[in-house]
Amino acid sequence: MKKELITLAMLAAMVGACRSEKPAEVATVKDHFKNDFLIGAAIPVTHVNGEDPKADSIVTLHFNSIVAENCMKNEKIQPKEGEFFWDDADKFVKYGEDRNMTIIGHALVWHSQLAPWFVVDKDGNKVSPEVLKERMKNHISTVVGRYKGRIKGWDVVNEAIEDDGSYRKSPFYEILGEEFIPLAFEYAHEADPDAELYINDFSMFLPKKREAYVKLVNDLKKRGLRVDGIGMQSHIGMDYPEFDEYEKSIVDFAGTGCDVMITELDMSALPTVQWGANVGDRRDFRKMTPEERKEYFEQFNPYKEGLPEEISVAWNNRMDSVMDLYKKHADKISRVTWWGTQDGMSWKNGFPIPGRTDYPLLFDRNYNMKPFMVKELTNH
Ligand code: XIL
């Protein structure tokens, strides 16, 4: 066992050392899975701006799809009414084109990272359904229209359903009711009839959430709307989800006729605080006493100096099983996208508790590939 681990560590170092040139003897992740699914990475603006050349080499070598981590979100791309900020999104799209990648847009209608003006009038009151429809239509047609023919698919609606299967009481829902979802799909399709359209959420393994999405997508399709994919974000942990439930969702989602997409994969190595990935649920330390804060960090941020060997082994074993599940359902899953490249850049270092040191991605902080994937690439 020990010997095997040492060999894996050496191989991992080798892959890391050779990352800028394609080593003849080591397959790339994207080639390895080319008959299974696309391999994607969420890309931050710093990366597109050339500020992280090591991450750039890794993405260029191992990934064939990218998604915008933040730069296409509502508050970034239309921070004020009618004032669109295109610089970052333009660079992101060009980055993908230069590397011949499948480019994914994220996200058109979402309650988080929503520009505050979008749902209120000048007095701060909620806008009427007519005004919100107009704003949604304008936002979607402007953003999707700008990249028409260049973006393969869009996360049209993100996180619309609660864990218990009810509609999230977002401003979109409160103003327009359930109709905001079909409307968003209609507007996106009008703006780029050839673009694929997806619905996306976290904790998709939960039975009530699964049922609600199957019903919702079937209803949208019955109405003649285009829906190509159901995105399972998959911000997962060492003790969730249960594989049976996760698998049931993959199977049931595929049963709607949609592609299943693993859209935001990361697996926290830290003690679980919560399952959900609602950005607004980030813990607020300002409300805690220094003692509480200290206790909290000792309990939930235990690996500040590095991941202990046994935790690393457990993480890699579990990730191995996750990949096995995806491979088993490769006929249903069209894309597996990691929410970032290397551990140091993961949003999980700041969510749900700010200031932790987590180890959730495919490459470690030294840009070395994690052993489970090295094994996958060398054993087959
Ligand atoms: C995250 C980004 O990674 C962070 O940089 C940002 O501060 C908050 O949002 N679900 C989603 C993603 O759909 O857009 C979120 O991304 C993570 C949860």
Image (cartoon, rainbow, N blue to C red):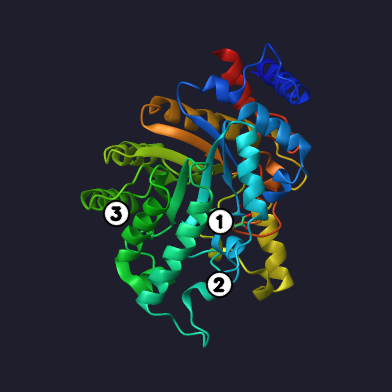
Name the image quarter holding the N terminus. Answer: top right
Outermost residue on the top side: it is: 25
- The answer to whether marks 3 and 1 mark residues whose Cβ atoms lie closer than 8 Å is no
In the picture, measured across the screen, residue 44 lies left or right of residue 110, that is right
Query: Along the line of sight, which residue is nearer the eye, 6 or 90?
Result: 90
SS of the residue under disc 1:
loop
Q: Earlier in the sequence, mark 3 or mark 2?
A: 2
Q: Residue 19, how many percent across, how many down?
A: 74, 25
Residue where numbered disc 2 is placed: 81
Query: Along the line of sight, which residue is nearer the eye, 97 or 283?
Result: 97
Q: Residue 91, how many percent across, how many down?
A: 67, 47
Compute the Cα span from label 1 to label 2. 37 Å
| Ligand 1 image position (quadrant) | bottom right
Residue type (three-letter) at the residue carrying disc 3:
Ala
Q: Earlier in the sequence, mark 1 or mark 2?
A: 2
Q: Earlier in the sequence, mark 3 or mark 1?
A: 3
- On residue 212, the disc is 3
In the picture, measured across the screen, residue 36 lies left or right of residue 83, that is left
Q: Nearer the viewer, mark 1 or mark 2?
A: 2
| Residue 276 visible in the picture | no
